[in-house]
Amino acid sequence: MIIAACLFSLTACHKTSDAKMQTLYIGTFSQAIDYAPYYIAKHFDWFEDELKKEGVVATIEYKAFDNFEGIKAALADKHLHAFFAAEAPIAKLRSDKDPIKIVELTCAMQLEIVVRPDSGIVKIADLNNKKIAVAFGTGSHYGLLKTLTAANLTEKNVAITFGFPDTAKIAFETNEVAAWAVWPPFVQEQIFFNRGKTLAGSETKIHSVMALHTDTLDNHPEIGRAIRATLMKAKEWMIENPAEAQSIVAKELFLQSDVVKLSWPKHSWGVAFNDNAINDIEDIVRFLVRVGTIDKNSITDIDEFVRTDLIKPVSQLK
């Protein structure tokens, strides 16, 4: 057995030494706490370690994208092997026939509506006739409409102002809007600085996901296996070492450690990529079709953007 083990070790080392050095590209859509497993893996060089186990010797180039044009160009040039984002951006990319598919969940995160402490707004029904900021075509937009429906309100009962966090934050802090529907850590940042409070019943769950280039999935499965293994390793480590993980993420994102600590419980790192998660993603797709972000005819089957065949074709969704 000792001889066999030595031979296996020599074979593995020979395989790695013969491997050609290559550059792999891993990115995120902007920066967010829900990408924490990615930041942890990057911090400990775990992507490289897991790739070596698959016989892949590579240097990793990391990039945070801030627009779809940059993401599309990177995918077209095969300069984006793995990508971390929420479900909605991936669905949009796939509806445009970009070569990318969801393969795993990074986490489930809780979206909420924040209002100012002195606003007099204490329940969802109080949002009637109020102006609310939200990013169009995102999980927060989906969550806001779902929350309003549960409170017997519709879009016609409120004035929705569309804007991403950079502009919505200003609108909220300058009293241009009465409420802001957004993801962590923006809610917790308002709470930490005593500029906001959350409304009970405004919580909505969406998923942060990891997606791979279809060329990686189809022609380089060893790279896909290694990247997924890295993600799972990071998630397990984070669950066992929350304080250290929070510290690493706070430094990576230049956030107050207390803001990250407040945001941490809003993320479920151990969530499984199962039928329930697929159903949640299906709901997001249905929503994106309804608001016109994607054309329902551009995606004929969920397998177009999720690596599974367990749910109905989008074209059958009403």
Image: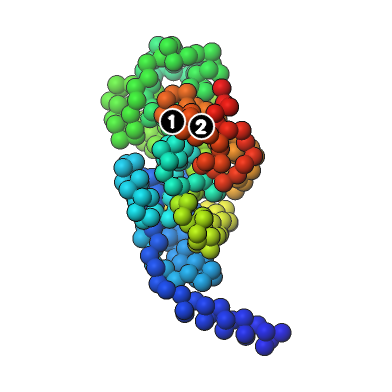
| In the rendered image, the vertical position of residue 32 relative to residue 176, given as above or below | below
Coordinates of residue 108 in the picture (x, y in percent): 54, 41
Viewer-side residue, 241 vs 139: 139
Q: Earlier in the sequence, mark 1 or mark 2?
A: 2
**Residue 196: which quarter of the image?**
top left
- Which quarter of the figure is the C terminus placed in? top right
Q: Is residue 103 above or below residue 49?
A: above
Number of the label disc, if any, that sits on residue 250: none
Q: Given the current orientation, which residue lies at the most extreme right position?
A: 1
> Residue at the spot x=38%, y=55% of the render?
78
Q: Residue at x 52, y 55 (%)?
A: 218
In 3D space, how far apart are the residues under numbered discs 1 and 2 (Cα atoms)?
Answer: 8 Å
Is residue 136 at all visible to an observer of this figure?
yes
The N terminus appears in which quarter of the rendering? Answer: bottom right
- Position of residue 42 in the picture relative to residue 224 (left or right): left
Q: Crowding at label 2, few (<14), some or many (≥20) Cα neighbours within 10 Å?
A: many
Please state the horizontal and vertical placement of residue 103, each as a whole percent of the image.
54, 49
Secondary structure of the residue carrying numbered label 1? loop
Q: Is residue 209 above or below residue 300?
A: below
Q: Residue placed at 29% from the left, 21% from the top?
A: 176
Q: Are marks 1 and 2 in contact (CB under 8 Å)?
A: yes
Can you identify the residue that label 1 sits on?
294
Badge 1: residue crowd in 10 Å (few <14, some 14–19, many ≥20): many
Q: Which mark is residue 285?
A: 2
* Amino acid marked by disc 2: Val
Query: Label 1 sits on what residue type?
Result: Ile
In percent of width and height, residue 33 lies at 44, 46
